[in-house]
Image: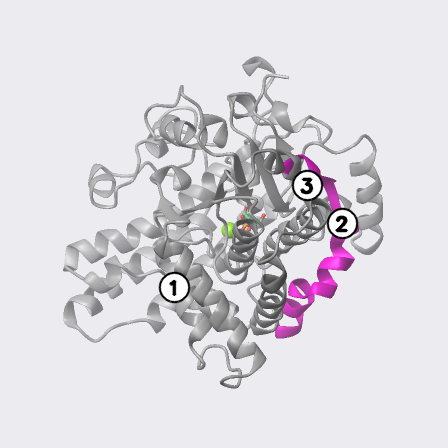
Amino acid sequence: MTATLPRPYLTSDKGTFGEFTANTRWAIILQNAVEDTEYSMKHDKQDIDAGKDILINLKAFKKEVEDNDKLRPFTQDEMKIANVPLSFNEFLENEGSKETWFNSSWLFAEIYLYRRVNVAFAMNAKKHGSKFWAEFDIFNRLKQETFQLSQYGVTELAIRYVNLNKHLQTDIDVETKQILFKEFLEISLWGNATDLSLLTNATLDDIKSVQGAKAREESESRILINHTKNAFDLLEKTAPNNRIDIVLDNSGFELYADFMLALFLIQSKLANKIIFHAKDIPYMVSDVMMKDFYLLLDDLVDRKFFDVKTDSVEDQALRKVNHDITEYVKNGIFEFKTDPFWTVDLDYTHIDPKETKYNGAKIHEDFLNSNLVIFKGDLNYRKLVGDRTWDKTTSFKTALGDLGHNGIKLVSLRTCKADVQVGLPKGKDEELTTFWEKDHPGKGNWWVSSGKWAIISYNDGTKN
Ligand code: F6P
Ligand code: MG
């Protein structure tokens, strides 16, 4: 099988979203990082000195990208001080030794970019003894600001949750459970439409238009592959004794939507344990780190953050959500974990007993105890299918490689924001390309990265 694997998407693939990302979006993301560092400058001497050096490094790094330099290996010091896994250098010193920013594997270069940013902070924090920069999340301001702009969707969902909660206290029949499961899975799915790396200039109306209930209803026909029933049937069989894992994607509204799904799964007795998996470094702009869970819980009850009247229906609903999540955390029903595996460059075919260097085998062993692993978002999907140039009708199982048949039951909830896609019926790609071409001349193939379509793809982990 290895011999026939298609190659990954490259940043030099003409007319792709990956090419556009490398040429246009990365410089903007790095410029924002420079500006946020300037904005966050502290007054203590060691913090100012470290901040100045971080800025020098970030600006030089941005120039490296713009000048299409080679992707350099990390130094021994960087690896030690910033805990950089060896996998990056293994790639760059071997098959990736000729890679430059605009001619490299898109997936690798993007993951490497966020690692380089992290290294700039870690090295200078250490050099100047600055605790402030050592703990700093360069994307925190953006994450928090966008979450605050999500007030409309957040309160709407909180009220929906409170109303439903009363009914869930009594036993509901399987049919109702299935309908609600579908609704909450879709809430979590479309929560992924609020991705900060794409929504940097979004207005309140833009955000409203992707977050409300009406928007979700209208979006149902845009779910190109929908394996909701497979996931439901699987859970229903062994309910309530199900452990569900959620490999998270973005903070703020998406994380809130994931909490909604998790609360529903517990209260509907479809599961009795949910484990959330977060990132260990600031990553892909909006991704969830452990500290983002606690920030979200605080935000829900902070009336300077969500400006609703004290004791109003909205206020009470937000408090109830905060209360229920807090209780589940206390009782161990919700658990949060992080692992360096989620931010290494390896794709998820390495979630397999064979991968013993970077925790792939450890994650695999852990997931064998899970009844269903939910992978959220676009980047997780790219990693699941190796971001390879698959024919879009390739089966999901084939594209998953070893992970397709090594015992892990999984579902991917993804709004499509990159070039890769598998599992489509014959002719669908062509149909959508023609459709998108009408309003986007010359860019018909970008339907797949527009964020307008989505998939819910399930795999049962067996050989067949
Ligand atoms: O495709 C655009 C992009 O920003 C990629 O850089 C990255 O794969 C992805 O979107 C991030 O989206 P998500 O937060 O859904 O993983
Ligand atoms: Mg993300």
Q: Amino acid at mark 2?
A: Arg
Separation of disc 1 and disc 3 at Cα?
42 Å
* Residue picked out by circle 3: 228
Q: Quadrant of residue 30?
A: bottom left
Left or right: 334 with respect to 255? left
In magenta stretch: residue 204:
yes
Location of residue 383 with respect to 447 vertically, above or below: above
* Residue picked out by circle 1: 34
Left or right: 83 with respect to 449? left
Q: Residue at x 49, y 85 (%)?
A: 310
Q: Main secondary structure of the magenta part?
A: helix
Dot in front, 1 or 2: 2
Q: Amino acid at mark 1?
A: Val
Give the position of the N terminus as an image quadrant. Answer: top right
Q: In this orientation, does residue 14 appear?
A: no
* Residue picked out by circle 2: 222
* Other residues around mark 1 within 10 Å, as few (<14) / some (14–19) / many (≥20): some
Give the position of the C terminus as an image quadrant. Answer: top right
Extent of the magenta region: 203-231
Dot in front, 2 or 3: 3
In magenta stretch: residue 181:
no
